[in-house]
Amino acid sequence: MSGRVLALDTILSATLYFAGKWTPELKRNQSRDLLRHLVCRLYGASKGNLFHAQIRASHASLGAELGLSREWTCKLARRLQAAGWLHYRALRLPDGTFEVGRFSVGRTLKRVLCMLRGYRKPRHRVNTRSSSFPLLQTEREKIFSFARKKQFEREHQPPTQATLRKIPILKAWLQRESIDSVPVLAS
């Protein structure tokens, strides 16, 4: 990414706008509040570079900060993760409990960040002109004849033993063909 850091208010405005637009089920509940809170914490932890930001936080601590119960915070976080706004991972400990989870930016939020940065997928046109000079007729024929020769060799090459192990019916067919091609001598 470039050295330019996006302002937090710009990220929050765009995130909350697109959260309501792209994920309407998040529009009328507290999921957006949790999303706003986590984006602020991720922004602070990464010093503005949200693409690789991670924070460790428990659902209980997040719920306490937002005035929500742990269970409700857990449900909201699952909704955000299902919609792709956040990624959450908590490892199971040997005693069966979970360690404190890690939150990071999800694919949908990365999409918003890319839009804000102005990144676009490069468009490939069908009829673009080549930037190099066209090949001479003799060079073109030599390349095509070499390619045709290699293709002919690949087509007439017998299958490998690994392929025959994967496709036993092909092996049986090839053996049958070799038996059928042996000429029968008349007695």
Image (cartoon, rainbow, N blue to C red):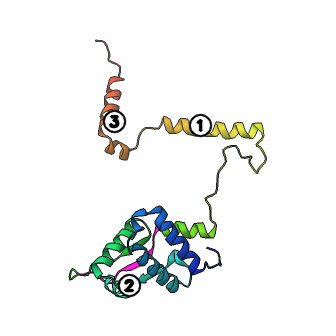
Left or right, 170 with reference to 119 = left
Are the residues tagged 2 and 1 within 8 Å (C-beta)?
no
Q: Position of residue 41 (x, y in %)?
A: 47, 84
Residue under label 1, please give it. 149
- Tell me the quadrant of the picture where the C terminus can be found: top left
Along the line of sight, which residue is nearer the eye, 36 or 87? Answer: 36
The first of marks 2 and 1 along the sequence is 2
Amino acid at dot 3: Leu
- The label shown at residue 29 is none
Name which residue lies at 66% across and 38% down: 144
How many angstroms separate mark 2 from mark 3 (CA)? 65 Å
Q: Is residue 124 magenta?
A: no
Residue under label 3, please give it. 170
Q: Which residue is situated farthest in the left direction here?
A: 95
Amino acid at dot 2: Leu
Q: Which residue is situated farthest in the front direction here?
A: 28
Are the residues tagged 2 and 3 within 8 Å (C-beta)?
no
Q: Which residue is situated farthest in the top direction here?
A: 187
The first of marks 1 and 3 along the sequence is 1
Up/down of 153 relative to 184, above or below: below
Q: Residues within 10 Å of mark 1 (few under 14, many from 20)?
A: few
- The label shown at residue 66 is 2
Along the line of sight, which residue is nearer the eye, 138 or 23? Answer: 23
Q: Which residues are magenta?
A: 97-107
Which of pointers 2 and 3 indicates the residue nearer the eye?
2
Name which residue lies at 29% across and 82% down: 69
Q: Residues within 10 Å of mark 2 (few under 14, many from 20)?
A: some
